[in-house]
Each structure stands twice: as C-alpha cells, then as structure tokens.
Amino acid sequence: MDTVMAVIQVLLALVLAGAGLGKLTQPYDKLSARMAWVNDFKPNIIRLIGGLEALAAIGIIAPLLIRSLLPITTPAAVGLALVMAGAVITHLRRGEYPMLVGNLVLLGLALLVAYGRLVGFAV
C-alpha cells in the first residue's frame, strides 16, 4: 500500500506543480483567455491559488525525499483538498460541469493521501 500512496503523491505533486506554477507565472490575461473562471477573481487571488497549489505540491512530495518532513504530508493534502473543494464550488456555480471531474478526482486523491498518511501508511 505504501507504494500506491507514494505513486499517488508523486502524481498529485506533478499536477499541482504544473497548475500552480502556471497560475503564478502566466499573465492574468492569458490565464483568463484559457480558463473562463479566472475572470471571476482578481489577479492577486489567482496568484494566491497558484501559490497554494505549488506549496501543496511541495508538501506532498517533499516527505518522500526528506523523511524528517513526514508530519507535513497530511496538512498539505488537507490543504489541497480545501483548494479543490473551492474549485468544485466555483465550477458548480458557473455551471461548468465537465470541469468538475478533474477537480473531484484531485479532491478524492488528496483526501486518500491525507487519510493514508494519517493512519500510518509508511513513506
């Protein structure tokens, strides 16, 4: 089970790092052209979301590399779950139902990692 959890953590970290860094580095206009929901938020909020995603990626992957960081896995995964819950709410409010699938998968995987690491699946 530990290997499965590690694979899920790596996949989550890769997805989050890409999404977070994109929101942090791309101009607001470019992001809003690609993702309509961006127009509902100010640029600083989009940067905040990107920063939270990037930090969650670090918090989820770093304990696999540095064992002394094990205690941050569960809070990072819970934080990611909260970000994804916000994404689900945003897409529901906007009627963007196809977008919900990815957010719900990431939400579920984040909760799985949080639970798995909390109950003691070793790294």
Image (cartoon, rainbow, N blue to C red):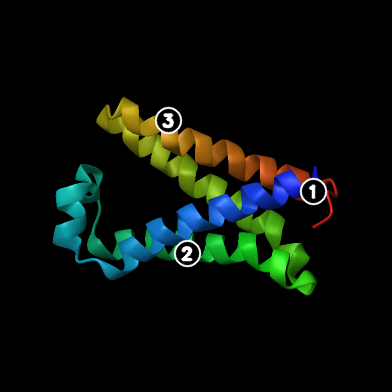
**Residue 15 place in picture, x, y as percent:** 47, 53
Q: Are marks 3 and 2 in contact (CB under 8 Å)?
A: no
Task: Report how far apart the C-alphas of labels 3 and 2 lie in the structure.
Answer: 21 Å
Q: Which mark is residue 101?
A: 3
Element on which disc 3 rests: helix
Q: Residue at x 39, y 56 (%)?
A: 19
User: Which residue type does callout 3 highlight?
Assistant: Val
Q: Is residue 33 left or right of residue 92?
A: left
Q: Is residue 80 left or right of residue 66?
A: left
Element on which disc 2 rests: helix
**Of the residues under marks 2 and 1, which one precedes in the sequence?**
1
Task: Report how far apart the C-alphas of labels 3 and 1 lie in the structure.
Answer: 26 Å
- Camera-side residue: 53 or 92? 53
**Residue 38 place in picture, x, y as percent:** 24, 50
Q: Which mark is residue 54?
A: 2
Task: Report how far apart the C-alphas of labels 2 and 1 lie in the structure.
Answer: 23 Å
Q: Residue at x 39, y 31 (%)?
A: 100
- Camera-side residue: 91 or 19? 19
Residue 74 occupies quadrant:
bottom right
User: Which residue type does callout 2 highlight?
Assistant: Ala
For disc 1, the marked residue is 2
User: Which residue type does callout 1 highlight?
Assistant: Asp
- Label 2 neighbour load within 10 Å: few <14, some 14-19, many 20+: many
User: For the N terminus, which image quadrant?
Assistant: top right
Element on which disc 1 rests: helix
Q: Residue at x 33, y 26 (%)?
A: 97
**Of the residues under marks 3 and 2, which one precedes in the sequence?**
2
**Residue 42 place in picture, x, y as percent:** 23, 58
Q: Residue at x 79, y 58 (%)?
A: 123
